Image (tube, grey):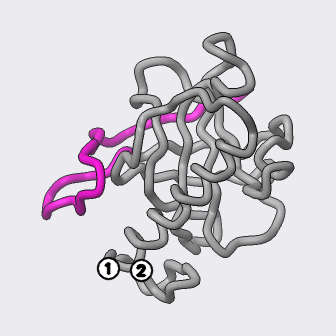
Amino acid sequence: MERATIDRDTFVRPNARPSAGVRATLIAGTVEHGDQRGRELGFPTVNLPIEEGIVGDGVWVGTVTLGDGSAYAATVSVGRRVTFYGRNGFRLVEAYLLDFSGDLYGQWVEVRLCSRLRLQRRFPDVDALIEQMRQDVEDTRAWAATRALSDDAQTAAGQF
């Protein structure tokens, strides 16, 4: 199993826009098959395994850049999926790309974590988790709408 790599400083300020010179955390790796839980919940994700200490657990807003150079706003979960696996699950980066459909298994991607929305937490049931995931995606769309990134970045809100 290939491990994701990281080569940037961590920027952790909820609901804030990075100031000039502040770099986002970059995690890069090959997309692996997961347990399809995100797809079952209505939020298919790209999955990258991640080791301890690379970046803090939580739900982040960021971007995912594909091998062809296209970039998408993304809601990204980093952690052990405690609602389903408790503290015993392995750490995983799961990125839900806004307005993307397609198969990325086996492809190299770069995930940039720009701002942490919230910490990981265990939900009492799947419905509560899905409700929070919808809010996380709405927050990501709002963040993306205020961002001025490259012309090839895509989201339903238009260029971001």
- The picture places residue 49, in percent across and down from the top left corner, at 64, 30
Residue drawn 64% across and 56% down? 96
Residue drawn 66% across and 75% down? 99
Location of the C terminus (image quadrant): bottom left
- The picture places residue 63, in percent across and down from the top left corner, at 48, 61
For badge 2, the amino acid type reads: Phe
Horizontal side of residue 144 vs 68, given as left or right = left
Tag shown at residue 160: 2
The one nearer the camera, 4 or 75, is 75
- The picture places residue 120, in percent across and down from the top left corner, at 50, 32
The one nearer the camera, 53 or 16, is 16
Name which quarter of the figure residue 148 lies in. bottom left
Horizontal side of residue 17 vs 120, given as left or right = left
Single out the residue that lies furthest toward the left. Answer: 20
Q: Is residue 159 magenta?
A: no
Magenta portion: prevailing SS class? loop
Label 1 – label 2 distance at C-alpha: 5 Å
Tag shown at residue 8: none
- Residue density around tag 2, few if under 14, some if 14–19, many if 20 or more, within 10 Å: many
Determine which residue is flagged by label 1: 148
The part of the chain drawn in magenta is 1-25
For badge 1, the amino acid type reads: Ala
The one nearer the camera, 145 or 106, is 145
Residue drawn 77% across and 40% down? 32
Residue drawn 72% across and 34% down? 125
Horizontal side of residue 50 vs 148, given as left or right = right
Single out the residue that lies furthest toward the top. Answer: 88
Disc 2 on helix, strand or loop?
A: loop
Compared to 93, does 110 lie above or below? below
